[in-house]
Image (cartoon, rainbow, N blue to C red):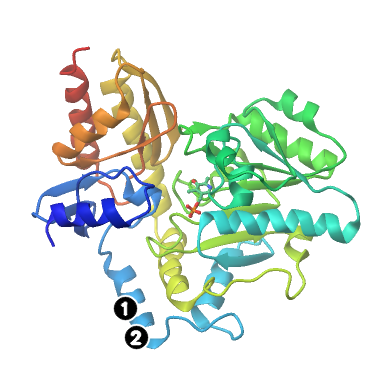
Amino acid sequence: MDQEKIREIEKDKYMKLFRRQNICFVRGQGCKLYDQSGHEYTDFFGGIAVNCLGYNDPELVRAISEQAGKLIHISNLYYNLPQAELTERLTESGEFDRVFFCNSGAEANECAIKIVRKLAYESGSGKTTILTARESFHGRTLATVTATGQEKYSAPFAPLPGGFRYVPFNDLEALKEAMTPDVGAIMLECIQGESGITPATYDYLVGVYAYAKQKGVLLVLDEVQTGTGRTGAFYCYEHYGIKPDIVTLAKGLGGGVPIGCCLARGEAADAFRPGDHGTTFGGNPLACAAANVVVGRLQDTDLLAQVAEKGEYLADALAQKLARHKFVRDIRGKGLLRGVQLDESLPVASVVGKMLSLGFVIGTCGHNTLRLAPPYIISHEEIDEMTDTLETIFANTNL
Ligand SMILES: *Cc1c(COP(=O)(O)O)cnc(C)c1O
């Protein structure tokens, strides 16, 4: 099928949701992607911060193939080996008491939200409200678009579920002012991803943690994008030295195979009784086999240290080559999750298009920001090439 035909089918028959680049990738190897006509691209987006081990990782491919030949799905009415192994891997540090596997980030957050509600229900405390941040992003289901503190995602889908209130991000005083007896949890991203790669300041997140503890309110961290090693630590919250009650993971967890996870400790881990929550596909052997490779790689090799080191290398390259440029407003992020906010005079879409034509896949996020989230195996040389190319584009753009 040629590119024109693919485009036509999408245009006529797929729901009108995505603004896609006119490109159809057919395979990948390492950090390289190849389109239908064999053009090579270096990937600095990883399918939205998902493909953390790059493409065609031999161990990941072998684990998935072998598991597919044994058992793809069996439901949670029975035990399965890869799920037990993944559960053990994710809880062996003792940080979390229990996990629940699902299929996406939104579902992982739904689980977290239901835990908060269930605890309020059981105790009769009335603490059903969850405070979330403006400019946050928590997913596309009705509850998670409502949790998301950006009206553009939720307003068209009213009536929305109740029980969410919004506070400005990185403003501890505003959070304290919003604290009322009905609040059961505070739900935040350590780095707001979709709205522009905006990290929580150290003082803010540490302050929120202490305040939540003081008030007896749960701290839920949505690490769907920042977790599974993306920032150079397994969880981004480790950089802040805090201990959330609930954490959610998804994007990178399966190295490209869909899987989400909600991890909880203390009373949050024991909120559910049989029947309270469930999933048909979640925790299936295939997805768990993939996640075991990713988590195993992060736990058993020096990959996390590599992410941290390459993340600093990328940050330095961006700072040295781009920071002084008139189009660059700000450079933010941690590890291999970096945002370059541009002046409104230069729309990010035009930069993404130019980068594609020059053989680099990069992404965007809120407030005219370029989003860089390459596979963890990205090389220094690839970082040099990509940042040189960005610099050249900025230098040759006259507005
Ligand atoms: C991507 C993302 C989600 C939603 O994940 P899906 O798998 O698309 O449902 C939720 N929270 C954050 C922080 C995300 O980046």
Task: Please state which amino acid type lies under the numbered disc 1.
Answer: Ser
Answer left or right for 386 relative to 305: left
- Mark 1 is surrounded, within 10 Å at the Cα level, by few (under 14), some (14 to 19) or many (20 or more) other residues, namely some
Which quadrant: the N terminus? bottom left
Distance Cα–Cα, label 1 vs label 2: 6 Å
Q: Residue 178 at what x, y percent from top left? A: 78, 30
Look at 31% across and 24% down and name the residue there.
347
Is the C-beta of the residue carrying label 1 under 8 Å from the nearest atom of ligand 1?
no
Q: Which residue is mark 1?
A: 65
Local SS, label 1: helix
Looking at the image, which residue is at 76% across and 37% down? Answer: 210
Secondary structure beneath dot 2 equals helix
Q: In the image, is residue 49 above or below residue 367?
A: below
The percent coordinates of residue 326 (x first, y second) are: 30, 12
Mark drawn on residue 56: none
- Residue 69: numbered disc: 2
* Image quarter hosting the C terminus: top left
* Foreground residue among 398 and 283: 398
Along the horizontal axis of the image, is 127 left or right of 395? right
- Check disc 2 and give the amino acid type: Gly
Where does the image place residue 172, in percent across and percent down from the top left?
A: 71, 27
Q: Quadrant of residue 254?
A: bottom left
The residue sitting at 56% across, 46% down in the picture is 138
* Label pair 1/2, CB-CB below 8 angstroms: yes
Q: Residue furthest front?
A: 12
Q: Nearer the viewer, residue 236 or 329?
A: 329
